[in-house]
Amino acid sequence: MQGRKEEEMSHPTHTPRWWWGAGIGLVLIVVVVICVLLVVHNQTSTNPTTLETSKPSMVVPSVRPTTEPAVTVVDTPPQLPRLDFPVGSVEEACGLNELPPYWVAADGILKRNTDHTNALESEECQIALETHMSTVNPYHFFWSAPEDTAMVFHLTKFVVLKDPLTFGRVFADPTGDSARVQDALSRAECLLLGDETDWELKETCHAEALLNYALINYLCFGGGINRRSEAYYAPGDNPTPEQDRLMWKQDFEDAWVSAQCEDLDPELQLTSQQHPTLFELVGPIQEWDSEERKAAAFLVELAARLGDATAGLTQSISWPGFPPGDGYKYGRFLKLFPSGEWGSLREVGAMMRMYRPSDDPTELFLKAFRFLALMDARRPDPRDEMQFDWEWVVQHICVPVELPPSTTEARGVDEPTEIQSCKEIVHELRQRDIKFQPVLNALDKFEQVAIELGVYE
């Protein structure tokens, strides 16, 4: 009995020790777990990849942040093939090869491109334009579009003058020319009317100034440049690189003229208040005309009466926008052009490629060569003699006029007629057994120049 009691008494003391050991073990385990968690926490807090994976909604910057600029997506215009331009020319100096196409897509349609990359502001371009434009005849500037060549016989292009009119002359001294015009209009001997002409008064009555002043007013105070020479190719015409660059060059030429006009004194404008005598001399005006245009035409024709050679070759048309004045009726070559034969040269040229001629083509060519022979003949008065541009004549007759589709549609031009080559024309004329030597001489000259220009066949 005593032994059992001792055993029962020893049991309570053994159980608490066990529990103490177990408690201590649990504490150690908890401590270890906490330490592990702390280590893991520290590692994940410094690892952006782990953080981004665990919280994909967060935006975490990269270790080396970069700032990318906003990019606007723009269609790059096609680059046209480069063309060979002479060094120092307007095309080369103004960088026409670097310009974008003349027509550019905008808002889903093709529009005129106004981005010339400030080429006009460069000194090199300005010098080239000044050099080029100072030698250009304003009437060539007005009358050189293919369709106009076909419709109007350009006397100013046909005749070669020793001292031709140029933009350099027109803009040389506008203020002085205005004063000289005032002087001429104040003197009765200078106011020729009707059939009167007097070339001996050319210098004293300031014939050149009369023409210059008329052109200044047409160019600068006549509502802006209405350039008949502009070669226009619509987007639908699919302009070639050469045609595209030509339209750019024309814009630069127009900009040069506009710049000259902007520098002029507004008091130079032709008005009835400034020139009351002139406006009193102006005859009745047409419905589409104006007193100012009629006054400018009077000045051009007066210059022709006084012997200015260029004024004597001017020819207007009863359409708005054409340069004023019909000086050919009063100038040095008055007796040559009213014959009517000069019209045959116009008709056998570009007109042959646009409309069917009313007469037999060979007969028309014979009339044209008679006219050329007449022009080339010597005259008792050297002032009546005329030198004409054979290259222009050959180009006019032998080279077809190629009008853009948009132009032919707008003007209702017929399909070009198929005609003979210049070689065939010359052959047929020689079969006529012509006896008049001046005509044969003109035919020989025509044939020679056509071969040299490579347009004979």
Image (cartoon, helix red, strand yellow):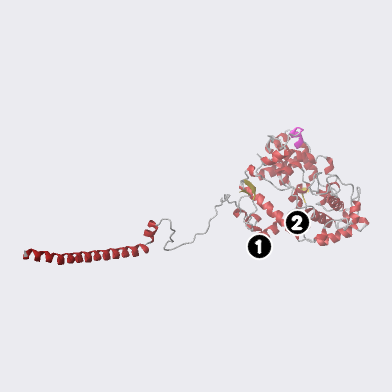
| 364 within the magenta span | yes
Decide which of 288, 245 is in the foreground and name it.
288
Image spot of residue 394 (x, y percent): 71, 43
For the point 87% across and 47% down, which residue is it?
285
For the point 84% across and 42% down, which residue is it?
338
Cα–Cα gap, marks 1 and 2? 20 Å
Image spot of residue 289 (x, y percent): 84, 47
| 15 within the magenta span | no
Q: Residues within 10 Å of mark 2 (few under 14, many from 20)?
A: many
Decide which of 450, 327 is in the foreground and name it.
327
Q: Quadrant of residue 262?
A: bottom right
**Vertical comparison of 43 with 348: above or below:** below
Q: Earlier in the sequence, mark 1 or mark 2?
A: 1
Pick the quarter of the image with the N terminus.
bottom left
Image spot of residue 267 (x, y percent): 83, 60
State the mark number for residue 123. 1
Which amino acid lies under the numbered mark 2 shown in the image of this protein?
A: Phe
Q: Is residue 61 left or right of residue 104?
A: left
Which amino acid lies under the numbered mark 1 shown in the image of this protein?
A: Glu
Q: How many marks?
A: 2
Closer to the camera: disc 1 or disc 2? 1
Q: Is residue 261 visible?
A: yes
Image spot of residue 192 (x, y percent): 91, 52
Decide which of 348, 92 is in the foreground and name it.
92
Magenta segment: 358-365
Q: Quadrant of residue 342?
A: top right
Helix or strand or loop: what does disc 1 sit on?
Answer: helix
Q: Is residue 122 left or right of residue 265?
A: left
Residue at which label 2 appears: 167
